[in-house]
Amino acid sequence: MRTPRAVIRPVKHSIGTHPRGEITVSALCLDGACLWTLATTSDLKAADLAMMTHTGLSGHPTFARTFEDVALVRRLKLHARPDPCPLDRKQ
Ligand SMILES: [Zn+2]
């Protein structure tokens, strides 16, 4: 009696930031009881400026920053283009 067999091959993948996504940042001041926070924004330069302004006004130089992006994983095929992004399919 024969049993079914599966052939398992390793498949390579790549991962990166989604080309149509954006990186966002939020922050909070880590100085003692300071309650300063930066709301989530995709304007990274404005975020840097807001933290530097807070430092200039308060003397607080340390912040916890949280960055977030949308990751896209694509299966790589030998001698072929990567799978298209499912978000790019027309509906
Ligand atoms: Zn502060």
Image: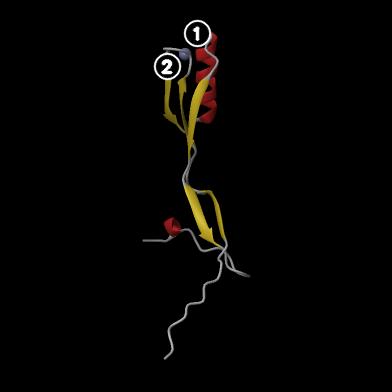
Residue lying farthest to the right in this orientation? 79
Instruction: Measure the alpha-carbon separation of dots 1 and 2.
Output: 10 Å
Work out which quarter of the rendered image holds the C terminus and state it: bottom left
The residue shown at (52%, 12%) is: 60
- Please indicate whether residue 59 sits to the left or right of residue 32 in the image: right
At label 1, counting other C-alpha atoms closer than 10 Å, the crowd grade (few under 14, some 14-19, many 20 or more) is few
**For the image shown, how many numbered marks are present on the structure?**
2
- Location of residue 44 in the rendering, given as x and y in whole percent from the top left corner: 52, 30
Q: What residue occupies the far bottom of the structure in this picture?
A: 1
**Foreground residue, 59 or 8?**
8
Q: Which mark is residue 68?
A: none
> Is label 2's Cβ within 8 Å of ligand 1?
yes
**Is label 1 in contact with label 2 (beta carbons under 8 Å)?**
yes
Query: Quick check: 59 left or right of 88?
Result: right
Q: Which residue is mark 2?
A: 36
If you read the primary sequence from the N terminus, does the residue marked by circle 1 or circle 2 appear first? 2
Tell me how the rendering is colored.
Answer: secondary structure
Rendered-image quadrant of the N terminus: bottom left
- Per the image, the residue denoted by label 1 is 58
SS of the residue at dot 1?
A: helix
Q: What amino acid does circle 2 point to?
A: Trp
